[in-house]
Image: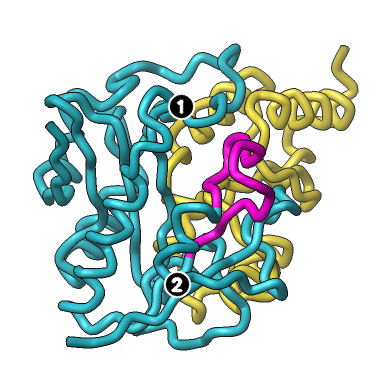
Amino acid sequence: MRTIRAITKRQILEGIDGHPFAEVEWNPTWGNPPPGQLIPCNMFGISKRKYQYAMWTEVFDEVGGIGFLTYEDGKLVGQMIFLPKKYARRIGLPTSRTNENLESTMVIGCLVVVREHLNEGIASAMIRELMSLCRNHGFRRIETSVDVRPPGKAEGNTSFFPFRKFGFTIDETSQGWESRPETRMCSCHILQV
Amino acid sequence: MKPGKVKVDLLINPFCLCDRDFTRLSRLCEKYALKLNAYNLWDIDDGDLVGFPAHVSALVRELRSGERAGSVYSTVFINGERIPINAWHESFRVIESKIMVLLGAK
């Protein structure tokens, strides 16, 4: 059975039980993560964090959430992390150059699904949850960086595939990740209730 | 070159992997007896930038203006030269080799 849960403030402070690689020190021999595999998550998997606490608690208090976790039969299989564009710009995350509505735009900074659960609609389910949150909290737009290559060739990047059916369009003028020329920002507008 | 002549700055992106990077870079700086200056993007207000090293403030301004494509990665500067930590652990091989060259270490 699938459940999607919002990340809680307690999880921000104490970490997430059952997170892949929880409490594991990064092993340099792992290199960068293979496609579709959750990386050792320094936001929630490691308790010795120094640098994220203030940011995430502040964002949580202002927005009412910072992300979703998807569980399949109790096992964590997917994660989405988001924050308002004004904060994404502050810390240098990928954002669209062509939209300056920093207060009313939400940016997805992380969207991952474990390899064995790819193509099961998990990313789509979390996007749907975020659209609902944005609708209820006055955010009028969502942005994220995606790999514009065909599905299956996106390697470690987030594919545009799950976003397209929700009406997201690619901003060809805005490269997503600085180190990944195959990425672009994509966005969609949110109709308010 | 003496250790004091090698300046190591770390501009921390606190989104995700920064503690991993900070730990690794700290160990590297300890190994070569270098001082590490760490700046956290979350804590830096635009008004503070005038007091920062020019290479750090220039990058922060570019990122915040949206001119430069972004990332979740932190950035290292060795004597002002930028080295993004965007490929573990190759980035740290590059960082260490730069330090060794500057120190004349073998």
- Total count of labels: 2
| Residue at the image position 75 percent from the left and 25 percent from the top | B96
| Residue at the image position 29 percent from the left and 85 percent from the top | A191
Residue B95 x %, y %: 74, 31
The residue beneath circle 1 is: A37
Magenta stretch containing residue A106, yes or no?
no
Above or below A138: residue A172: above
Residue A134 x %, y %: 25, 74
Q: Quadrant of the C terminus of chain A?
A: bottom left
Labels 2 and 1 positioned on one and the same chain? yes
Which lettered chain is shown in yellow? Answer: B
Residue B58 x %, y %: 70, 70
Residue A168 x %, y %: 48, 70
Q: Depth check: give the residue in front, B101 or A168.
A: A168
Q: To which chain does the residue with label 1 belong?
A: A
Report the span colored magenta: A144-159
* The hue in which chain A appears in the rendered picture of the protein: cyan
Amino acid found under the numbered disc labelled 2: Gly
| Residue at the image position 48 percent from the left and 60 percent from the top | B41
Q: To which chain does the residue with label 2 belong?
A: A
Q: At numbered mark 1, what does the secondary structure look like: helix, strand or loop?
A: loop
Relative side of A181 to A109, left or right: right
For residue A167, the mark is 2
Above or below A85: residue A46: above
Badge 1 crowding class, 10 Å Cα cut-off, few under 14, some 14 to 19, many 20 or more, is some
Amino acid found under the numbered disc labelled 1: Gln
| Residue at the image position 33 percent from the left and 80 percent from the top | A190
